[in-house]
Image: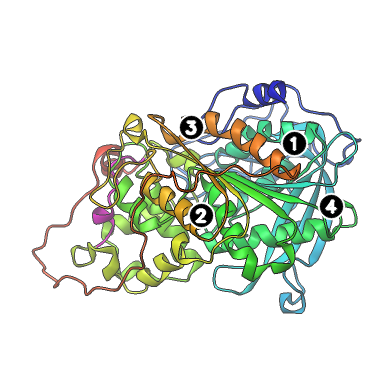
């Protein structure tokens, strides 16, 4: 196991995940129709101007069967992409109200791709009925990676850190072979699967943000995850069975899905509760309003702010246009399809105050926003009923994110450490055994290298039925995570100063980049 973990970590961490090694476990013959990697004669262009005309027309098939998609509108780097996925698989004509959450709508077998390269690993992709952030029926897709040898009948639900506002960056499309800046994280996470596949586990990778890419909408992440597990257990192709043991695993954006799935399971999916052996998470977004204040104006992570605002507004049909500043409208339009891979360190200096009009400088004054922020506050959600391993670090200063104001304090650069401590206390108070690890002086991305090996071993121990260790009673004090209340906007003043972004974000805005 130690050798497998060392190979899996192989070991360069990035803002999106880990670099894949050169070898993966082999599998039975993949489906014949999967396209080969991009040939040398196909040039994929990238241009700062997303409207630039490129030599290869969009959606033109190359000799290898790939479709050149062209620059992706709205991404700040104007990133070009290669598409191999079949859009028809994601479409469902039938009335979703006729199906129950987790019902299978369609299945297919494909080859696994990492960064556009086909690997000798088989995947069953399942389209299923799930529920969006507002409780409406929607479509979900999960990709279940099958082990080479005899399956051990156990399932790991792994939640990707793909963090994007573009549904075309979803893990299912990356696994099918699509290649864009926003799919890089999914490709680099391939190494995470190795220890589980080698031990006979099947690994489900759901498109946790749903089919609209509702970034940061935690309840939707959780429901999509739980219904993906239901679908996998219902699949006759996978032969897992209704009693298969299931573990939850995710870091950063993937931790949103892991925590919310665990917390929603007792009420949303009580049928799955006997299957769930435990959840391992790290670098968790607990209370978004605290994160807004923590990363506000930071040099590397501030770009997450407009991404989260956009994702939540999209998920909950919140019209923010009347309250946005001119800059706020520009940046939310520019980033409407962007991924974290394209935004990280590219929009440092963005502040909440620069995005909203002066009278709405307090987020609690924006109509409708308080209700949404309370809905995505983990502390206000039900308690889980399973053991947890939670990893968090406090070295955000390494990334240039200084401790937040009173009541927030230190973080890892993007996530607030005190909030994670508080959610650990919440789980302990509900009677769960929680192992809490706080890694000193490391930023968010680097901490993955410490968290992942421990989380993997911890989760395998839960599958083996070993008693879960606990830190309950020894976890440092956390932050107050109470509900927000609406406040009135400040009086409208035509002479009020409209703050502008700082840092790189200001420069990019001035030169229209």
* Secondary element at tag 1: helix
Residue extent of the magenta highlight: 347-356
Marks 2 and 4 sit apart, C-alpha to C-alpha, by: 41 Å
* Foreground tag (2 vs 1): 2
Q: Quadrant of residue 45?
A: top right
Horizontal side of 153 relative to 80 (left or right) equals right
Say if the magenta span includes residue 461: no
The residue at which mark 1 appears reads as 196
The residue at which mark 3 appears reads as 447
Q: Would you call the spot at circle 1 few (<14 residues within 10 Å), some (14-19), or many (20 or more)?
A: many
Marks 1 and 4 sit apart, C-alpha to C-alpha, by: 22 Å
Q: Quadrant of residue 9?
A: top right
Mark 1 or mark 4: name the one nearer the start of the chain: 4
Say if the magenta span includes residue 349: yes
Mark 2 or mark 4: name the one nearer the start of the chain: 4
* Secondary element at tag 4: strand
Mark 3 or mark 2: name the one nearer the start of the chain: 2
The residue at which mark 4 appears reads as 108
Mark 1 or mark 3: name the one nearer the start of the chain: 1
* Secondary element at tag 3: helix
Q: Position of residue 137 (x, y in %)?
A: 66, 73
Horizontal side of 267 relative to 451 (left or right) equals right
Query: Is 392 or 63 nearer to us in this picture?
Result: 392
- Of all residues shown, which one is farthest toward the left? 495
Magenta segment, principal secondary structure?
loop
Q: Quadrant of residue 257?
A: bottom right
Quarter of the image with the N terminus in it: top right
- Of all residues shown, which one is farthest toward the front? 473
* Foreground tag (3 vs 2): 2
Query: Is 174 or 372 nearer to us in this picture?
Result: 372
- Relative to residue 112, is residue 481 depicted above or below? below
The residue at which mark 2 appears reads as 428
């Amino acid at each position: 196991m130690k050798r497998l973990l060392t190979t899996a970590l192989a070991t360069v961490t990035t803002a999106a995940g880990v670099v894949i090694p050169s070898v993966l476990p082999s599998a039975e013959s993949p489906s014949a129709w999967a396209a080969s990697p991009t040939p040398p004669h196909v040039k994929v262009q990238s241009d700062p101007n997303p409207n630039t005309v490129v030599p290869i027309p969009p959606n033109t098939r190359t000799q290898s069967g790939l479709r050149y998609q062209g620059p992706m509108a709205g991404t700040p780097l104007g990133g070009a992409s290669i598409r191999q996925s079949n859009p028809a698989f994601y479409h469902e004509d039938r009335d979703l109200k006729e199906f129950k959450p987790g019902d299978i709508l369609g299945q297919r077998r494909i080859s696994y791709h990492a960064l556009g390269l086909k690997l000798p690993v088989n995947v069953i992709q399942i389209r299923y009925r799930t529920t969006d952030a507002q409780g409406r029926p929607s479509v979900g897709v999960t990709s279940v990676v099958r082990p080479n040898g005899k399956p051990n009948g156990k399932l790991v639900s792994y939640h990707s850190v793909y963090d994007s506002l573009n549904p075309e960056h979803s893990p299912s499309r990356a696994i099918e072979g699509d290649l864009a800046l926003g799919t890089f994280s999914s490709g680099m996470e391939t190494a995470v699967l190795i220890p589980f596949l080698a031990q006979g586990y099947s690994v489900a990778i759901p498109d946790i943000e749903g089919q609209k890419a509702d970034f940061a909408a935690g309840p939707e992440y959780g429901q999509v995850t739980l219904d993906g597990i239901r679908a996998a257990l219902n699949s006759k192709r996978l032969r897992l069975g209704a009693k298969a043991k299931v573990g939850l695993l995710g870091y950063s954006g993937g931790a949103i899905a892991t925590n919310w799935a665990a917390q929603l399971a007792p009420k949303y999916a009580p049928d799955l509760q006997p299957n769930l052996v435990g959840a391992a998470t790290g670098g968790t977004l607990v209370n978004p309003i605290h994160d807004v204040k923590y990363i506000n104006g930071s040099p590397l992570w501030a770009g997450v702010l407009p991404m989260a605002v956009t994702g939540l507004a999209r998920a909950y049909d919140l019209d923010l246009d009347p309250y946005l500043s001119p800059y706020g409208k520009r940046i939310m339009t520019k980033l409407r399809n962007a991924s974290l891979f394209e935004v990280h360190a590219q929009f440092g200096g963005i502040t909440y105050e620069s995005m909203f009009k002066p009278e709405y400088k307090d987020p609690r004054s924006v109509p409708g926003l308080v209700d949404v922020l309370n809905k995505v506050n983990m502390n206000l959600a039900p308690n889980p009923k399973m053991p947890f391993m939670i990893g968090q670090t406090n070295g955000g200063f390494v990334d240039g994110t200084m401790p937040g104001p009173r009541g927030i304090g230190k973080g890892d650069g993007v996530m607030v450490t005190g909030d994670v401590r508080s959610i650990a206390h919440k789980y302990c108070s509900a009677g769960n055994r929680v192992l809490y690890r706080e890694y000193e002086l490391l930023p968010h991305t680097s901490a993955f290298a410490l968290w992942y090996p421990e989380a993997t071993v911890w989760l395998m121990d839960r599958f083996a039925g070993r008693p879960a260790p606990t830190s309950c009673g020894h976890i440092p004090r956390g932050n107050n995570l109470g509900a927000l209340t609406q406040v009135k906007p400040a009086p409208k003043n035509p002479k009020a100063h409209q703050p502008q972004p700082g840092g790189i974000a200001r420069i990019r805005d001035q030169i229209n980049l």
